[in-house]
Structures are given as C-alpha cells and as structure tokens.
Amino acid sequence: MKSSARTQGAAMLVVVLFTLLLLAGILAATLRLSLSSRQNTADQAATLRAQYAAESRLAEVTQRLREYQSILSPTRPGPAGTTINHILVPPSTTQAELQTYAEQFCNFNATANPWKDTQEFKTARTANDKDIFDTAQECAVDAARVGTNQFEILVDIITPEAYEVLDKSTERPSDTSNSDIAKAWWTNLLTTQQSGTGWKLNLRARRVVKLTPVRYRFYFGVLNARVRAQEGASQRVLLASRAKDGEWWFEIQLPNLLEDVLMTNHHRAKPSSGYDPEGTPGVNFTDQEFDGSIHTNEKFLFSSGATTKFRDKVSSVGCIDLPSDGRPDSGDCAKKVGVYIGGAYKAPDSSSTSDAQRDRSIVGQIINGTSNVNFVKKSDNTVDYAKTNFTASYKPLPENENDQIQAAKDGGLHFDGSVQSLLLKAGDRDGNPLSSYSNNKWSEASGNIYQYIVVSRKEVSTKISCTPGDWIYADKKSGSRYVPTAAYTNQVSSIGDYAAKQITTVWGKTRYQIRSVTCRNVESSTIVNEEYRYGPDMVLEKKPDGGTWDKATTVKAEFNGVIYAPTFAKVAGPARIGGDTTGALDKASPALTSFSQVTLASSGDITLSSDLTVSETPCTFAQTRATPPCTRKPKNLLGIYSQDGDIIFDDPLPKNVNIHAAIIASTGQATVKNYATRAQNGDVKLIGSLVENWYGAFGTFGSNNTGYGRNFTYDNRLNNGIIPPFFPVSPRWDIKSADEVSTNRLFNLISSNAKSGEF
C-alpha cells in the first residue's frame, strides 16, 4: 500500500510540473503575440504618418504649381479693386513676330514645317470654349532640341510684378528686368527637374496651337511629380501625373474690335472742356435692351430704377487713366473695377480674391441695387457668369488710318480732296436701283447687276502767287557813277520771300534798285463729278465725262473695296420707295449688291444722309438665337471708319433710318446732327456694330423727345470672320487664359502610391 501511495504521489508531481510547463508556454506565447501586435500597430502608425507627410509634400508641389499658373495668367487682383498685369504683349509686336515666338517655343527646326493640322478645334471643347477653328494648326515642343531663344516670348511678355506671387524671393529671377537672367530662369524651370526636400517636379512647355494667323495658344503641363516621406523605418512615395484637365494655356490674339453691338472707350458724352479721366460715367442704363454684347473701357452707370435687359455679354474694364483719345503711355490702362449705381461708385466685395469673384460681386450689387436688371440666364434661371465680365481687358481703338489710305491707293479709290457727296447704289446696267424685295433679299438679275459709286468731290490745284514791294535804291556813288550795295536775284526758286533787282537810268546815271517779293502757294478748287461701277468680276470702270458706259475705262482690274477721302460730307444710298416713313426694309433699296464689300475710311467727319442697306439682309442677333435660328451669312458688308472725326447722322434724314454697317469713330463719336432741336424722328435701326471713343448723343428724352432713338442689333457675321475689307484692328494684343473657359488648371494632378525605387 505504501508503495502504491508513493507511485501516486510521483504521478501527481509529474502532472503539476507538466501543467506548470504548459502554463509557462502559454504565457510565453501570449507575451510574444502581444509584443508582435504592438509592433504591428507601431509600424502601421509610422506608415500612416509617412503617407500623410508624403501627401503634405504633394500639396506643397501643388501650391508651387498654383504660383507658376498665376505667373502665366493675364492678371491678378490688386488692392482696392485694382488689377495687376502679369502678361503684356508690346503693342508694336507684329503678326510675323508672334509666329516667330511660337515657333521658337516649339524649338522649331528651320528645315521643317512645325505646323500640323489638328482636329481638336473643329468641335466645341467646353460650353464656354466653343468657337470653331476649322483651319487650326499646332506645333509640338521638340524636347530633344535646346533652343537658346525657346522662351523669349515669356521673357518679353511676363511683367516683373508677375514673379511676386512666388512666396520666397529666392525662388524668383534675381533680376526680373534682366532678359538674360529671366531667360535662364524660364529655361531651368521648363526643361530641367526641380527638386527640394522630399519632392521632384518636371514642368514642361508642351505645344502651341495657331487658331488663326492672329490668335495663338501656348500650352504647359506637368510631365511628372514625385514626393517621398520617411517615418522611422516606414517610407511612402507618391507619383503624380497630369490629369485630363491638367494642361494650362494662355492665349494671345489681336482682338476683333467688332465683337460688340456697342463699344465705348469713354462711357460718357464728349466734354467741351475739363476732362477728368476718373470722372463718373455720364450715360445711364435705364430701360434699354441690348441685342448683342456691349463693352466699355470705363465703367457703366445704372439708375437705381434700371430695368435694362442684356441679351448677350456685358463687360467693362474700369480704366481710370485714359487720355481723351488714344492709349495711355504704358499701352494698357490703370484699372479700378466696379460700377456706378444711382451715381454712387460700388467696388467689389473686399473678400474677393479673384477676377471671377469680383465679377460676381459686382453683378450681385447691380441686381440688388436696381429694380430689375436682366442678365443672360442659364437653363436653371441663374445668372450665366460667362456672359458678364466687369474685370475685362482693355481694348484700345485704332491709332491711325495709314493701312486704309495705302489700301485705297493700291487697289481702291483714293481722293486727295474732300468728297462732297458719295452715292452707293446696287443697280442694273442702266443704273436703275433694285425694286423687288422678298425673303430678306433684293432681286438681282443675273448678268445685269452692278455696284455703282457716284462721287462729287473737290479737286484742289495749287499755283504760286507773288506780291511785290516798292522799289528802293540799293547803290552808292563811287566817283562819277553808282555801284550796287546789295546782292540780289530776280529768280523765283522757292516759296517765300526774295529780292528782285532792277537797273534803271535816273538823270543820265545808271542806278540800282531792289524790292522784296513775297510768294505763296494759293489753292483753288473745282467740283468734279465722277461715276464708277463694277460687277461680280470686281473690275472697276469709270464712265467718261458726258459719255456712256460702253466707252468706260478700267480703273482697277480687281477693286479691293476701300474708298478713302479726308472727309465725306454726304454718304447716301438710293432714295426710299414711295416716301416710306416706317423704315420697312422692302422700301429701302440697297446701297450694296450681294457681292459688294466696301470700307469707307476717312481722317475726318463722315456724314450719313440716307438709308444704307445691303442687298441680302443679315440676320439680327435675336434671329440667330431663335428656334430655329437664322443662319443666313450673306457676303455683302459695309464698313464706315473715321480716325479723327465723327460719324454724323445728317439733318434731314429719313424717319426710322436703316444702317447695315460696322462703324468705328476712333477719336470721335457717332452722333445725330441737331439732336436736341430737331423733331423726334423714330430710331436709327442699326444691324452691325458701333465702336466709338465717346458716347455720342442721338436725341433727348422726356416731356419733349427729340432726335432719334437707338434700335441696335448685332450682326453676328462680324464675330465669325466676315469683316469689311482692310478694316482697322485693335493696336493691342489681348490675353486670356484657360480658367476663363474651362476647368483646366496646371495643378490638376492624378497621384498614386509607388515603390521606393521610383522616387
């Protein structure tokens, strides 16, 4: 029994020991699992911190790209409603120079044509970038070549103020006024890898698109970006590339001055004295309707009860340093954007940090401060801000008529003397005006239609007229005779004063006399009447004096449509049919045939004395927006341009007069003669565009209306490549950027995690 008890005790001891060993093993395993879990949690936290740090560095890269984008943008908001220019193209830049800039940007090899056709612009890109350019071409940047002048355009057009957006002065060119330093800075930025602590960035110039010969887009984009962050043993790498809308561009174009139904340089009447560049605009918006876009280089003024309706875009610049005519010395104007409501200036909200925000602020103040001003609406009945721009770019007017004078001499009609009257008429071979109008078109007989130009002009001739003085002695006695004391001549060699000689005998003695003679050019003028015509072949003929057209002589083998004179005292079309007073188009025989495009250009005044219509009536702006839209695009077009004078609507003038024309008064105004005293005579019914330096008066309105009202509608052809021949263009290149018409941003990137070795 004792032996059995001892055996049982030993077995129990073994069990206890085994249990203790098992518990120790379990405890050790539990401790190991706990330590491993803690280690995994620590590793995960380090990895997460590394991810956050990498994303933070990518945000730094994104901010850097925002700053580069700002430099490559036209402007940025300045203090107190001002605007700071980032891109300014020198006004003297020619079309050929711009193309050279573009080809340098692409690293063009002179042995090859860099321009290739592109399909990208044959359809709309976005709702706001929808203009069609069927002939657009592009050149891709050749990264394999290194051109010393590749970024010359950026050196020449980026202003020193633009670089101030870079937070650190050490990141800017050391001397922004030194072209070599600026060129090296751009070359380094756009051709080599930029890097810093934990980041690398490759930003590149990508391509140029030539939309038209005077409209270019310069493109930039991120090739790649890499960031890396380390937390303990954990490392995270992010690789970023350009998103679909990550391409940034700015566009340079020679703007079309005829893109508005009404454009004013100064939105006020021409002052008789005391012009103040910062003065309040003097033309109130009250209850007008604008069938087309409008623009001013100054600010608009709304009455507090205004119910104005805008059918298209409305834009203003806010210039505060415009001279009475011409451009500021800088080529651009100083700006203080805003609007006047009830005579009080309203600035954009101080919290606005972008032009888009400032524009919305001004629109809101107009809507809240007036009775019921209507801007263009979107389908959800909210304001379409693509149709408002109260921070627009300055658009200067033409500065001289030299191109038109030369064109008139080369292939048109150039008159040295003032034209007393000019009659434009579409007629048959016998000179009869057209008489049948249907479906917006006058009937033209095939083979029997001509454009007539009948001129009555001053022909000035010059001759020398001389006035002599009295004879005086110019000699002295020498012994028994007289000798001359002065040199003299009796030859007329030039205009001016000279001395004449005379030798005479007095009391048997030879004496010498002189007298002064004053000679001047004296002008005389005669009135010359001439008649010209051309057919669809554009051969301009002149009818002989008192003769017939079968004896006509050819003046120009291919008439270019330009007619120049120092002034036009009277410009008219055919007389109205049946004495109509309504302005019905079927009663206003056309001044121009269906094939005629004519520009009247002058240094001085041009006075319009009748209807001036065209054989095929263009669509009104409202008709192009109707359902179905009007799609007529006739070729006949009239341009009227005065550089230093006014466009004057004559007195008398038919009631409800029709004018189908693009009109520019570069330093003057378009105004109605005797507007304040003549009886109210209906409207000036314009289909076209009016561009004027000053807002000219047409009439007075109130208890006793006088003059004419305005019934203007835009001719949409003028914004689609159909303009009068050799018509003037803006002397200032316009700049726009991708954010105005798209969601494209330079900092739009797509990122993903990458392996450590990919940094």
Image (cartoon, helix red, strand yellow):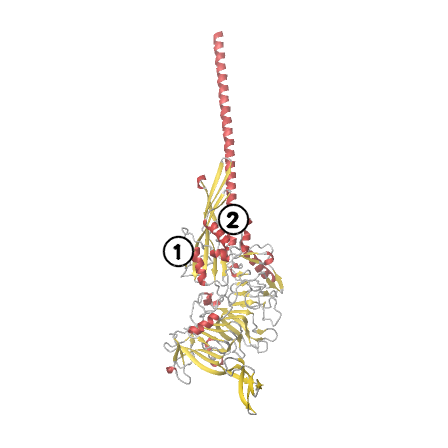
Q: Find the residue positioned furthest to the front.
A: 479
Residue 411 numbered tag: none
The residue carrying pointer 1 sits among few (fewer than 14), some (14 to 19) or many (20 or more) residues within 10 Å by Cα, namely: few
Between residue 492 and residue 669, name the one nearer to us: 492
> Whole-percent x and y of residue 408?
45, 73
Q: Residues within 10 Å of mark 2 (few under 14, many from 20)?
A: some
Residue 84's x, y, as percent?
Answer: 56, 57
Residue 192 in percent (x, y) is at 46, 48
Residue 310 visible here: no
Front of the two marks 2 and 1: 1
Query: Quick one: 75 or 594, which is closer to the camera?
Result: 75
Q: Quadrant of residue 680?
A: bottom right
The vertical placement of 128 against 716, above or below, is: above
**Mark 1 and mark 2 in contact (Cβ < 8 Å)?**
no
Q: The residue tagged with tag 1: helix, strand or loop?
A: loop
Circle 2: element type: helix
Mark 1 residue type: Asn
Q: Which residue is mark 1?
A: 109
Q: CA distance from mark 2 to mark 1?
A: 32 Å
Residue pointed to by mark 2:
64
Specify whether residue 4 is in view: yes
Work out whether 412 lies above or below 155. below
The residue type indicated by label 2 comes to: Arg
Q: Where's residue 292, x and y in %?
A: 50, 66
Q: Is residue 539 left or right of residue 59?
A: left
Q: Earlier in the sequence, mark 2 or mark 1?
A: 2
Of 318 and 497, nearer the camera is: 497
